[in-house]
Amino acid sequence: MANIKSSIKRIRISQRNRLRNQAIKSHIKWLMKHATKDEVESAIDKAVNKGVIHRNKAVRMKSKYERSHSRSTQ
């Protein structure tokens, strides 16, 4: 355990952010299976704005979602 006060705070902050990021990522995965295109894209864009995922990964996720759902509807 860290002895420096700022290090202790950073540990708490990083744990909080890690839990938030995990929740957002798992929510996006759930949406990709159960939600509409607009809801998925909105959630991905919000995750990018919060810094949870990189914008290039967001583009890949949207593209992957489009490809998988265009095949299933044909």
Image (cartoon, rainbow, N blue to C red):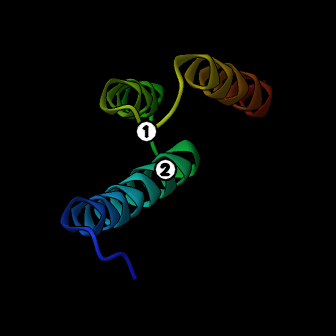
Asked if marks 2 and 1 touch (Cβ < 8 Å), the reply is yes
Q: Residue at x 66, y 22 (%)?
A: 66
Task: Please report whichever mark, 2 or 1, sits nearer to the chain's N-terminal start.
Answer: 2
Label 1 crowd bin: few (<14), some (14–19), many (20+), radius 10 Å: some
Label 2 crowd bin: few (<14), some (14–19), many (20+), radius 10 Å: some
Residue under pointer 1: 52
Q: Which residue is drawn at 41% across and 26% down?
A: 48
Q: Is 62 on the left or on the right of 2, as rendered?
A: right
Q: Nearer the viewer, residue 23 or 2?
A: 2
**Residue 50 found in image quarter:** top left
Work out how far the residue at label 2 is from the one at label 1, CA to CA, in angstroms: 8 Å
Which quadrant, please, contains the N terminus? Answer: bottom left
Residue under pointer 2: 25
* Residue type indicated by callout 1: Val
Q: Which residue is drawn at 19% across and 67% down?
A: 5
Q: Nearer the viewer, residue 74 or 57?
A: 57
Residue 39 image position (x, y, % from top left): 37, 32
